[in-house]
Amino acid sequence: MAGKRILLAGELSRGVATANRLLPLAAALAGRGHEITLALPPPLNTALAASVGVPTRESPVWGLPPPPGFIAISYADLLQLGGYATPGSLNPLLDGWSALLTQTTPDLLISDFAPTAMLAARLAGVKQAAVGDGYSLPPPGRPMPLLRPWAEIAPGAAADAEGRVLAVIDACLMGRNARGVRALRDLFRGAPSFLCTFPELDHYPIRADGEWYGEVFQVAAGPQGEWPKGQGERIYIDLDARHPAIGPLIEVLARLGLPTLLQGAGMAQALAAEIAKPNVKVTTSTSRSALVEASDIVICQSADAAIPALLNGKPLLMLPVFVEQMMTLHRVASQGMGHGLSPDSDAAELDAALRRLVDDSVCRQHAANFGRSYNGYTPDIALDAVVEGIEDLLA
């Protein structure tokens, strides 16, 4: 196939999660001779531009924080947080994506949680597809399904939120002499979706007819890491350096004497030195896979670490901060593969949760069963299938 121009676009920021999927995809498509442009939210575009070897652009994004106390209950709320609260905030985003499409003239737009890029592509008549995990590719519904199935949500709240967002979209489209959308699910109409997750870890368990490709993530080479001395299960910790539970968690692990490696990439040296204990070591190894494989229990907050852990059959203690992380914990816990706590848990609660997980042979078995069910899986399996599907679209 002759090379095509492809714009890979990420918009609503999810930290490194978006980059971990789009960077391998960009490299794979470029390796097949396609002309790739990568648009990522700041600061990811500048930090990662050199690593992939393709031209990068800064995605047009809404930069203001959510109002105090705002709780997202559906995809519509995520859009409101991303600039869909008023026509005055959405119009500049739509202008920015339209300009980017004009500048790059892609044969295909591939969006990863980039709804405004999809809206601009619809206006411009650009062919498009969507890639992502369950969180960024919700199952179609009217209204879109709830993000928090474990919470009590007022009847009609999701429909009300969707109605507000649809009014904003329609106002912007009317100003461009374009027809509005009847439901948010119509944003994905005509855009084939590549759902990069496993059915057991799909953020939406209600999805009945999904085609799950498996997770796409980066596997970095690196040393396994030298485990500190200690008695009992090896604990691997992968939390944001600013996570509120790190202090009390280290206190508990030091008291229990469990050999522990904490991922310290990006952590200030002063904090790393403060954390280090005889049985707790901070590592900057980028080889998460090697560290996970050598551990017995993984403590994390997000799917980035949870999925490699489960693929290796390791049970989880999750301390989620954001709603998508809570959704991952909900799926993990509902299938008995791990436990979860609030990120603000104190030392006593963390101590009890760790002891419970150490003694929970059923949980360990469920995690091991998941690992065995995907024995031999590598991210290249999903990546190759997605690339083949994209080339079929281009053909």
Image (cartoon, rainbow, N blue to C red):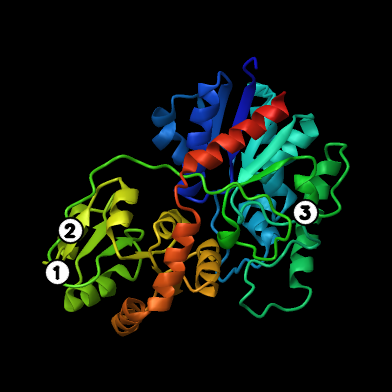
* Residue for badge 1: 230
Amino acid carrying label 2: it is Trp
Q: Earlier in the sequence, mark 2 or mark 3?
A: 3
Which residue corresponds to the image point at 23% horizontal and 60% vertical from the top-left? Answer: 261
- Residue 66 versus residue 358 in the image, above or below: above
Judged from the image, the secondary structure of the residue bearing numbered disc 1 is loop
Please rate how many residues cluster around mark 2, counting C-alpha atoms within 10 Å: few if below 14, some from 14 to 19, many from 20. many
In 3D space, how far apart are the residues under numbered discs 2 and 1 (Cα atoms)? 9 Å
Q: x and y percent of residue 211 in the render?
A: 67, 49
- Which quarter shows the N terminus? top right
* Residue for badge 3: 184
Q: x and y percent of residue 88 in the render?
A: 71, 48
Does residue 96 appear in the picture of this structure?
no
Amino acid carrying label 1: it is Gly
The answer to which quarter of the image holds residue 259 is bottom left
Q: Earlier in the sequence, mark 1 or mark 3?
A: 3
Amino acid carrying label 3: it is Leu
Judged from the image, the secondary structure of the residue bearing numbered disc 2 is loop
In 3D space, how far apart are the residues under numbered discs 1 and 3 (Cα atoms)? 53 Å
Residue contact at pointers 2 and 1, CB within 8 angstroms: yes
| The disc label shown at residue 227, or none | 2
Q: How many marks?
A: 3
Drawn side of residue 204 relative to residue 177, left or right: left
Please rate how many residues cluster around mark 1, counting C-alpha atoms within 10 Å: few if below 14, some from 14 to 19, many from 20. some
Q: x and y percent of residue 294 in the render?
A: 27, 57
